[in-house]
Image: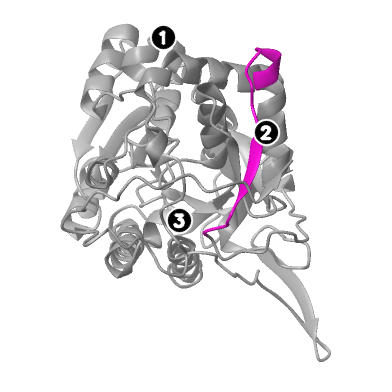
Amino acid sequence: MRICVLGGDGYLGWPTAMYFSARGHSVLAVDNCMKRRLEAELDVIPLEDVPDFKQRAERWNVLTGWEIEVVRGDITQADLMNQICVNFHPEVIVHFAEQPSAPYSMIGRDAAVLTQQNNIVGTLNVMFAMREHCPDAELVKLGTMGEYGTPNIDIEEGWIEITHKGRSDRLPYPKRPSSLYHCSKVHDSVNLEFACRSWGLRVTDLNQGVVYGIETDEMSLDRKALRTSFHYDDVFGTVLNRFVVQAAIGMPLTVYGKGGQTRSFLNIKDTLQCVELASVNPASRGEFRVFNQFTELFSILELAERVKRVAQARGLCVEIQGVANPRVESELHYYNAANTSLLALGLKPHLLSDELLDGMLERALEARNQIRERLIPPRVDWKRGMAAVTSAAAGFEAAPEPEREPAAATA
């Protein structure tokens, strides 16, 4: 198939481009490299240097003989999406091209506006370009489990059957996003459901959990030249990455609040599987299909305890500390989400194992001299933002290195 990967320079976009290329598909990868610019403005870096995606595509071609066509461009410019749909005529569009960080969106007004303009306008441009130029193509859009929040009822896959005052209907599942980034994802879902219902587009919305891991079969061909990013900082990093890096440098694993926050997780290899399953088993014309894309549920404290156990098996001294929670969220809550659709299509999960955690820890230990400890403690308060940031769009003033807070609780 002809597959266009929007956000092809990203943590998930680049592995997805290689994954489809290795399976014989024609792949076009598009990215404006905005996230790299935002990282530079915030003075954060991934654990290991990540080559430019054009360099990675060239190396991929040398190693495999397969070509990933690369376009550096911004899909918030409608002309670009129109040109892609006319010239490449994709059969599948995989859409990762969004500002991906909840903490970033809470820095302040400018960061929130950038997040929502980039994410919502980009998706609108994809919708209109598809309607005009490739209406039979399928859009596989990366959503997030964070759209749902933590309701005190079971979370269904996008839709819910309800009976109210004697009448029944099937309606989109209620959303309670926890950040302005998650709000942008909810807006995307609303717009895409409208486009399916009104224009007959076909869309699969992948409400994805937190992804972990940096190893895929394709990257093993040249780990240095084909690698994807491993972020551990407080803005673009994820909780498991943060714990692994903290264990590697002897810093206590910082659990926000009580640590009872339960979230959904999946291995990066399963993300690739899920995107492929959605692509080769497309939605019907006019169908807005929602898959909850995760394999396991963990509380934050459970993750910390697992990392501690693996690190101690290596002889590392690791402690767990509770710190004041910078987020506005329930720290103890009910959480039970359905995830049957992708399993029914053939997803074979790679579950979180001590072996995988040990591999992540090994990478962190190899790069420990490059770790910037000052980037780990939370700098963005959900209520007050980041005071040191003056402009999300025009540039950032580097935030002062925060002092580590004393332990509020020890597990």
Label 1, on which residue?
221
Q: Please name which of the two marks, 2 or 3, marks the residue nearer to the observer.
A: 3
Give the residue type that dot 3 points to.
Ala
Q: Residue at x 27, y 47 (%)?
A: 42
Q: Is residue 178 magenta?
A: no
Label 3, on which residue?
102
Q: Residue at x 57, y 47 (%)?
A: 406
Label 2, on which residue?
347
Figure quadrant of the N terminus: top left
Q: Marks 2/3: CA distance?
A: 28 Å
Give the residue type that dot 1 points to.
Leu
Determine whether, in the image, residue 110 is placed left or right of residue 140. Answer: left
Quarter of the image where one finds residue 342: top right
Q: Secondary structure at mark 1?
A: helix
Q: Secondary structure at mark 3?
A: helix
Give the residue type that dot 2 points to.
Leu
